[in-house]
Image: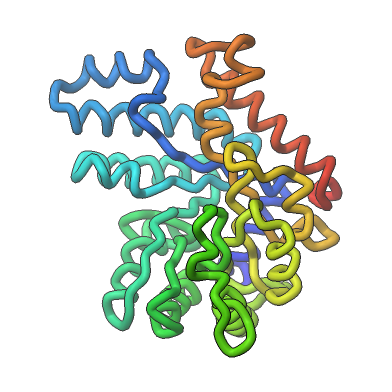
Amino acid sequence: MTVSHYSVRLNAAIQAKRTPALVGLDPRLDWLPPDVMAHARELHSDPAAVAAAAFEEFCVRLIDVVAPLVPAVKPQAAFFEELGPDGCLALARVMRYARNSGLIVICDGKRGDIGTTAEAYARAYLAGADPQAAPWHADALTVNPYLGRDTLEPFVKVATERGAGIYVLVKTSNPGSASFQDRQADGQSIYRHVAQVVEELSEQTAVDGFGCVGAVVGATYPQELAELRSAMPHVPLLVPGYGSQGGAAADVGAAFTATGLGALVNNSRGINFAYRSAPYAEQFGAKQWEAAAEAATRRMIADLAEHTSAGVL
C-alpha cells in the first residue's frame, strides 16, 4: 500500500522535480495560439471537432513543455465537457498523455453525490497508481462536499483501494466563497466544519504523515490558509489563486511544512497563455507560445523556492 499511496507518490514527484508548482490545463478557444487553431481547422470542419482537436493539441504540447519541470498538472474538465463528446474524448486522451509523461494528474471536475452514484464517479475518474484502472486515468479528483460526509466516503473508499487522492473544496479562492463557506454554525465557520471532516478522513488514511484526502484552499485567503494548515495537519493541500487571481508566493507559504511538502500551488492562465501578457508578449509572442509557457513556469518555480519552504526541496 505504501508504494501506491497517493500522498507517497505525490511527495516523491514533488521531491524529484524540487517544486510544488502545479500547472492547470485550462484551454480557452478564443485564447489559443493561431498555429494550434489553424492545424485543427485543417483536420476538421465540424466546430466541436475543431475545438476539441485544438484543445488536445494545445494541452499535449503544453504537457511536453512542463513535464520536465513540474510534478503535476490539473486539467479543468468543464472546458472540455462544454464541447460535448468530442471534448470528453479529448480530455481522456490529454489525461492519458499526461500520465504517460510521468505527471501526477488531478482532474478538476468538482464531482459530488451520495451512495452508489458517488462511487460511480469515483470509479470513473480515480485510476490512482494504475493509469488503466479508470477510463479517465486521473490520480486525483476535486470533490464538492456540500451533500455531507456521505458524499466523501465513497470517494475515499475507491481512493484508498486504488492509491488515488481526492481534493475536497474547503475554502475556495473565488471572491464569493464567503457567501456559504464563511457562514457561522455552532460557533465556527462552515469551512471549518468541512475541514474537521476532511482532517478526520485524511488522518485515517495517512502514510508518512499525509492521507489521500486533500483540501482545496485558495491563495487569495492567506490568513485562512494558515489557519487551515494548522487545523488539517494530515491533509495535502491544493492551492489555487496564484498568479492571475492575485495570489503571490508569500501568500502561500503557510501551506507547506518545513520540508517544503504538504501542498501543490496551481497556476493555469499565467502559464497556459503567458504569451499574451507581460513580460512574455513582447519577448516571445504567439509564434513562440511554448517558450513563453516554459519561461512562466520557471519563473513560478523560482518564486516559490524563494518565498516558501519549497526552496529546501
Relative to the observer, which residue lies in front, 32 or 153?
32
Residue in view at x 64 percent, y 44 percent: 242
Residue 176 pos. (x, y %): 50, 57
Residue 13 lies, with reference to residue 68, above or below; the image says below
Q: Is residue 288 above or below residue 109?
A: above
- Counting from the top left corner in percent of width and height, residue 134 is at 35, 61
Q: Position of residue 169 (x, y in %)?
A: 51, 66
* Relative horizontal placement of residue 153, taking residue 20 as reference (left or right): left
Q: Is residue 178 left or right of residue 221?
A: left
- State left or right for residue 18 relative to residue 95: right
Quadrant position of the N terminus in the picture: bottom right
The residue drawn where x is 67% and y is 71% is: 210
x, y (%) of residue 75?
44, 46
Q: Nearer the viewer, residue 283 or 44?
A: 283
**Viewer can see residue 82:** yes
The image quadrant that residue 122 belongs to is bottom left
The answer to whether one can see residue 205 in this image is no
